[in-house]
Amino acid sequence: MNAKKRTLLITLTGRDRPGVTSRLFGTLSRFPVTVSDVEQVVIRGRLVLGVLVSYGSDTDVGKVLAATEKVAADLGMEIELATGSGGDDHRRHGRLHVTILGSALRPAAIAGIAGRVAAHGANIDRIERLANNPVTCIEMHVSGADPDGLRVALAAEAAEQQVDVAVQRGGLARRAKRLIVMDVDSTLIQGEVIELLAAHAGRAEQVAAITEAAMRGELDFEGSLRERVAMLEGLDESVLGQVRNDVEFSPGVRTLVRTLKRLDFKFAIVSGGFTQITDALAADLGIDYAAANVLEIEDGRLTGRLVGPVVDRPGKAAALKRFAAEAGVPLGQTVAIGDGANDLDMLATAGLGIAYNAKPVVREAADTAVNVPYMDTIAFLLGISREEIDAADAEDAELRL
């Protein structure tokens, strides 16, 4: 039986410059060692390079130590060396991504989250920054934690620290997300279309009150929708065009769609609103699929009624399943984004359900919540950094010149 292999952990720190990595590995290549793990990060021009190598009893580890110390001295860097024993892979099973978003990310927030991770007997293997604008986003690679238990604990810590935290399984499941399905009112766009229409009918306050109760889950959605639509009776259909012009996308929507479409994502919108508005929004953004309700119009005026079945809470989930089937995407590879109670079934059906600036009942039920007013932060939850987004935009701009 072969003797148990030993390990040597080499950590170099200092000013980054070209050739550091090649110099270290060139030196290690002179010895009978094998590389088990490598981590490298550069922060503000300062390099941290960690290399774990394994070696057998026939290796003169003293010579390895002396050679690596000389590399550090020649480069003017600090070095830490630690020997040990065991297998080649010291990482524990159950890899998770813990993504932290904050408009102002304070040390206390990171301390609280790291403390919760430790309290669950888990380990933070790596931390990296994904964005520093319009919010700060960092991601922890965590091993050895139960995802459901950690998600509950970190949700409580996030509320206390006033940051957003998402917990997702690592590996292929996260990278395979391929269909994004978004609610429209107060998610894709700012505000509620039906309230904009109601303002033209002089019924804005009444409609807004019913909308709020419905989004909190206090009213049956279909009944409340029909009640609100009835208040629009008699409006000239030209009002629909005015409202389309008044609608504003949520900040970052165009960036999110543009970025993920580069990666061959499909997009869908599903709304309790109206096709007379949503169809134009879908065409503007290049959305692949859309579902919404249809306002009845006769003789150029709204009748106060709907045509066909209502897209309600179950209807949104059904639409997500239909879009996934048409796109050939398994439900586990879908992402749903919404803010109201009528989005709950859709969020539960998707592989990842995101509550976006949502009502409390939705935040509690969703896989994760985003409470900053920037839709492009969704890309960070999928592991895409701000630097990658900006670089892709710059490359496209050069190609257009």
Image (cartoon, grey):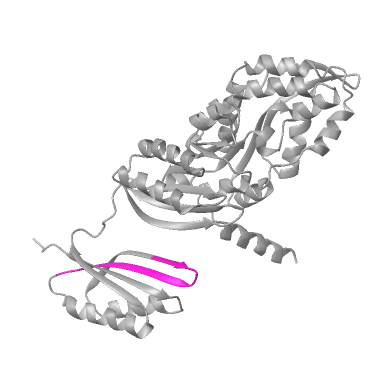
Q: Is residue 195 above or below residue 12?
A: above
Q: Is residue 201 above or below residue 7?
A: above
Between 21 and 218, the one lying in front of the other is 218
Q: Residue at x 54, y 43 (%)?
A: 178
Task: Give the magenta-colored segment's residue range.
Answer: 40-56
Q: Main secondary structure of the magenta part?
A: strand
Q: How many labels does the image show?
A: 0
> Would you say 235 lies left or right of 388 here?
right
Q: Is residue 226 above or below residue 43?
A: above
> Would you say 121 lies left or right of 325 here?
left
Q: Residue furthest right?
A: 299
> Would you say 370 lies left or right of 120 here?
right
Q: Picture coordinates of residue 375 (x, y %)?
A: 62, 44
Looking at the image, can residue 251 be seen?
Answer: yes
Which quadrant of the figure contains the N terminus?
Answer: bottom left
Residue 67 placement: quadrant: bottom left
Q: Which residue is drawn at 76% across and 23% down?
A: 205
Which quadrant of the figure contains the C terminus?
Answer: bottom right
Q: Picture coordinates of residue 329 (x, y %)?
A: 53, 38
107 in magenta = no
Q: Residue at x 42, y 56 (%)?
A: 127
Q: Picture coordinates of residue 354 (x, y %)?
A: 54, 37
Q: Picture coordinates of residue 126 (x, y %)?
A: 38, 57
Between 400 and 362, the one lying in front of the other is 362
Residue 310 placement: quadrant: top right
Q: Which residue lies furthest to the bottom in this view?
A: 74
